[in-house]
Image (cartoon, rainbow, N blue to C red):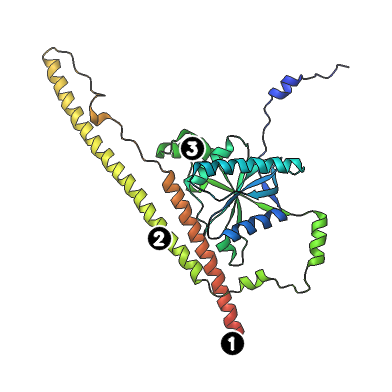
Amino acid sequence: MAAPATRSFLQVASTEEVASPLRVVQIEGLVVLKIIKHCKEFSPALVTGQLLGLDVGSVLEVTNCFPFPSREEDEEIEADGANYQLEMMRCLREVNVDNNTVGWYQSTLLGSYQTVELIETFMNYQENIRRCVCIIYDPSRSSQGVLSLKALKLSDSFMELYRNHNFTGEKLREKNLSWVDIFEEIPIKVSNSALMSAFMTELEADSPVTQCDYDRLQLSSGPFVERNMEFLIECMDDLSVEQQKFQYYYRNLSRQQVQQQAWLQKRRAENFSRKAAGEEPLPEEDPSNPIFKPIPEPSRLESFLVTNQISNYCNQINGVSGQSFSRLYLMKALHDN
């Protein structure tokens, strides 16, 4: 019987492991409570924090977190913030707590998180962490009786384009990338240990009604919808500015093409005369001529982000308005009875 072929350690190490796609983000209940507490305490100011846990197959487990100090522009304070993070990681390691960074969390106001700064933070994390996520918590949306907690990551095709800083229309069509393909939302699963679940069952009140249930019955949704409309109008103005940039670019491009055609016809007529005189023709392209200098196409990244943000505001307004109508019809039926 032939002996099975053995592989050396170097052969095994050199073999690239095919990473399974990220399917779910599993967060412990205590981590969710820490994130909510930190974001609500400083609301409406925006805060961030570090996520710690384990990357196991297609599941990203978030087992702990800690807040970052308040952001400041001073370089010395930023350096202190970095030292604070390292010291926190060291202390967690000493008490045998998971200290592997798996991403970060941040608060947002009415879902206005889709910015270039978020993308740059993702790219900085991706340099050291193979898979990372950003947990977005919206205190203003959660006050409407809905836990607004999202786990986001950048799509692979978008990251490839962002590294090359090439967001022209040709590249976007080549990659078949649209504004909905920038971020990927990963499903969140909140988990607790068996002992914690048993303890929470013991603490559960006899009344099945909770404060969250009362929050869902609030009839006043005007301020929330009004703020969303204000942000939506601002985004529409930003989108109009981006469209004007592209209109200006296409006008210049059309004007340049007309100038090139006129110059080319003139050069061909001149070459025809030179051939008739027995002289060598001149080249039909002159790189030194300004009309042949390519006009740079503006990046479409900002317009993609603004369009994403507009879609987010519209979905929020649609969701809140639908729930408000349901509550109003319910109250009308109760009043009639």
Quick check: 50 left or right of 208?
A: left
**Residue 196 in sight in this render:** yes
Closer mark to the observer between disc 1 and disc 2: 2
Q: Give the alpha-carbon distance from disc 1 to disc 2, as whole Å.
A: 38 Å
- Residue at (12% x, 16% y) in the render: 276
| Mark 3 Cα-neighbour bin, 10 Å: few <14, some 14–19, many ≥20 | some
What's the residue type where badge 1 is placed?
Answer: Asp
- Which label was assigned to residue 162? 3
User: Which residue, given by chain and number where applicable, does mark 2 sit on?
Assistant: 233
- Looking at marks 1 and 2 on the same chain, the residue that comes earlier in the sequence is marked by 2
In-front residue for pair 103/46: 46
Task: State the image coordinates of residue 150 (x, y, percent, origin top left).
Answer: 60, 53
Residue placed furthest toward the bottom: 337
Residue 257 vertical position relative to residue 320 in the rendered view, above or below: above
Is disc 3 placed on a helix, strand or loop? helix
Taking the image as shown, residue 300 lies to the left or right of residue 133, namely: left
Q: Please name the residue that numbered disc 1 is placed on.
A: 336
How many angstroms separate mark 3 from mark 2 (CA)? 28 Å
Which element type, helix, strand or loop, lies under badge 1? helix
Residue at 49%, 59% (x, y): give it: 313
Q: Quadrant location of the C terminus?
A: bottom right
Q: Which residue lies furthest to the top in this view?
A: 278
Which image quarter: residue 6? top right
Marks 1 and 3, how far apart at CA: 58 Å
